[in-house]
Amino acid sequence: MARFDYFEPDHLDEVFDLLGKYGEDARVVAGGQSLLILIRQGLLRPSALISLDRISSLREISHKGNEIILGAMVTQSELSAEDRIRKHLPVLAQAASKVGSVHVQNLGTVGGNLSHAEPNGDSAPALLSAGAAIRASSLRGEREIPLESFFRGPFENVLEADEALTQIHIPVPPNDARSIYLKHVLRAVDRATVSVGLMMQVDREGRCQTVRIGLGGAGPTPVRAKKAEALLEKEKITDSIIEAAGMEVSRNCDPLSDAHGPAEYKRKMAGLLTKRAIRQVVEAYSKKREV
């Protein structure tokens, strides 16, 4: 049976003191669902678990200036229901609504989902497409990490032993931007085989002004499809350019074969979902212009 010290501090300074004391032998608990499974399986043997549950500031969703700021303890259920998220960042609301079962969404947090650094997690592709950054905090101060630089490998992030993820900062997209999250699964409650988060701006002539594509399950970590983005940007969105973008995603992604599917299958699905996401966003623009 696993044995460890368990703490429920009331303030962040207490969290940082404990992290400084235990170092790499400590684990921060957000929702805790994935972490406890790893401990039960003997894959992790921490000396201390430090819960963030009592720190109310980490449960806030705020809108400051041109940013939406998520506390690390905001749950997936709260994300999918929050009006500002649904209005400005539908890609994130959609991703949150597809994280496992309702029970998982009620307990699972956005900070925990990102820190777990699972290659096929739902939050990361959506937030990559939105240009999010992580706020990492410790007794030494705070630092901001672009999300695309946050993942080091499967189930591994760049946080130092004395740091905790405290906030996610997301720029508010332009009013004319459109976004979508698509996820391929065998069952609705499964983790993604492959997933795509897409945010685009398309002008009245059908030309792509800006685009960001986040991929899950398409490599050892969640990634941006930068080569496909470069193909689309400043180009008129036609069937041929959509096909080219999908092929670029399939060609450049590097998925792992696992229980969710072989690498070659994931590679094809990543391209297919990318094409589907682009078409759905372009269709949304067309419908708006017809109104």
Image (tube, helix red, strand yellow):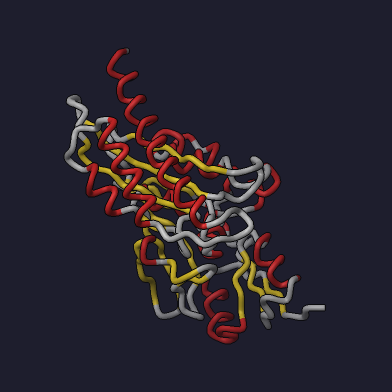
Q: Is residue 108 left or right of residue 240?
A: right
Query: Residue visible at 63% across and 72% down?
Result: 50
Above-or-below relation of 145 to 272: below
Above-or-below relation of 71 to 79: below
**Which quadrant holds the N terminus?**
bottom right
Residue 193 image offset from top left, x and y in percent: 56, 50
Pick the residue in front: 221 or 253. 253
| Furthest residue toward top | 291
Residue 134 is drawn in which quadrant?
bottom left
Pick the residue in front: 118 or 91. 118
Query: Residue visible at 43% across and 40% down?
Result: 272
Residue 57 in view (yes/no): no
Query: Residue visible at 44% across and 41% down?
Result: 273
Above-or-below relation of 31 to 102: below
Residue 266 image offset from top left, x and y in percent: 50, 51
| Furthest residue toward bottom | 21
Pick the residue in front: 13 or 222. 222
Query: Residue visible at 53% across and 84% down?
Result: 20
Above-or-below relation of 91 to 57: above
Residue 37 is drawn in which quadrant?
bottom right
Residue 235 in view (yes/no): yes
Q: Is residue 68 left or right of residue 49?
A: left
Pick the residue in front: 107 or 17. 107
Q: Is residue 290 left or right of residue 195?
A: left
Q: How many marks?
A: 0
| Furthest residue toward right | 1
Residue 202 image offset from top left, x and y in percent: 24, 32
**Which quadrant holds the C terminus?**
top left
